[in-house]
Structure formats: structure tokens, C-alpha cells
Amino acid sequence: MQAVDVLIVDDHEIVRTGIRRLLEDAGFSVAEAASGETALALTQRDIKPRVVMMDIQMPGIGGLQATRRMLARDPPSRIIILTATAGGPLPRALLRAGAHGYLTKGCSVDEMTRAIRRVAAGERYISSEVAQPLALSLLEGEGASPFDGLSARELEFTVLLSQGLCNAVIAETMSVSPKTVSTYRARAFGKLGVSSEAELIKLALAHGVADCA
């Protein structure tokens, strides 16, 4: 397998190209993947990145599922989440799941390279833009967002449903049965206090769960 410093996983080519040029100028070797599925396949057979920079909202399995699968491998990948959302339950959920860093797409090149080096060295890195709302949510209590009460899989279901996917596609994406998806749906609806998909999506948008590109 070919060793590279960074694997960029993002479905927007212009984003991947821009980040790649910046990182290569900083001396990193870089590979790209346009989807979670491609990233999983590449890291399984072709490349061994020191750090994976993962977007969350992508077609197919998306960043949440790809992160979970990469972290379940032996050895697990070292993953930095790079996305547009700084608040809401996603940073906490991904960090609890084992992600090693969290950056927003508005971060500087210096911060990005610093985060990559620290995570590659075995440390964790959370940008100040993410750390502040994360700390405030903890001060306000665990119930600051209604989505904090969801399990990782229930939250993953919620993100996929917010993308307009049907149960069958969600089941295939999450590698579970349609019956299990129905269970996630019932639990998520119950915990969030909603009775329809429209209500759930509205709540997800209000708390930064659906809009996490």
C-alpha cells in the first residue's frame, strides 16, 4: 500500500482541489476521495494515509458512516472532521465516536496544517470555533440540544433521513435491515418528540444536524 500524509474525503471537487494544493504547498503528500465508499475502498487496498480529513454530508454512506467504519478497523484511521458546521450535536457525537480532530472549512491553512501534524503525532485537535460552542453546550447541560439524547446510530439515521432518503436506501447505507431502520426511526421520533418526517427535518435544520455540508 502507498503511504500518504493526508486523504481528503469530500464530494465537491473544487473543495478537494483547493485543499490539496494548499497542503501540497505545505509539503504534504495528498490523495483524494469523492465519497465515503471510495475512501473506504482506497484505505482498504491502495493507500495508507497518516490522517484522513473527512467531510460529513456526502452522497452515499456519507462522512458519519465512513468515519464509524474507519474507526472500527484495526488499526483505526486517524480522522479529522472538516465541515461547515461548528455547533449542534455533531461535533460532540463524532468526537465521542473516536474522531481525532474537528475543523471548520473556514479555518486557516496554518491551523489545518497544525491540526494534521498534531493528529498524526497521536494528539487530538479541536478548533477554537468548534471548542467554544462545545464548551457552552456542556455548561448548559447535556440536554442543550434534543439530538444529544440520540445514540450514534439514531443520529446517523436522522442525518440520512434529513437528506430525503427512504427507509430502504437508509437500510442499505447503514448496512442494517429495514426492520432495524424502523426501530431507529421509532426511537428517534420518540426521543425528539416528533410525529412526522417533516417535523424531524425541521428540528434537524434548526439544530444544525441536516445542514452539515
Image (spheres, rainbow, N blue to C red):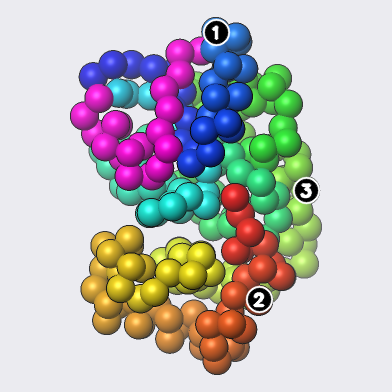
Is residue 127 found left or right of 180 in the rendered image? Answer: right
Residue at 41%, 22% in the rendered image: 31
Residue 175 coordinates in the image, percent (x, y): 26, 62
Query: Does residue 34 show up magenta in the picture?
Result: yes
Q: Give SS at disc 3.
A: helix
Reply yes or no: does residue 33 show up in magenta: yes
Where does the image place residue 108, in percent across and percent down from the top left?
A: 73, 26
Residue position marked by numbered label 2 in the rendering: 203
Determine if residue 126 is in view.
Answer: no
State the SS at label 2: helix
Q: Which residues are magenta?
A: 28-46
Left or right: 4, with 17 as reference point = left
**Label 1 Cα neighbours within 10 Å, binned few <14 / some 14-19 / many ≥20:** few
Residue depth check, mark 3 versus mark 2: number of the one nearer the observer? 2
Question: What residue does disc 1 label?
Answer: 27
Measure the alpha-carbon separation of dots 1 and 3: 30 Å
Q: Residues under labels 3 and 2: Cα distance?
A: 22 Å
Q: Is residue 133 left or right of residue 81?
A: right
In the figure, 117 relative to 73: above or below?
A: above
Q: Amino acid at mark 3?
A: Gln
Type of amino acid under label 1: Gly
Q: Position of residue 106 (x, y in %)?
A: 73, 36
Q: Which residue carries the number 3 mark? A: 132
The one nearer the camera, 2 or 202, is 202
> Looking at the image, how many numbered discs can be counted on the residues?
3
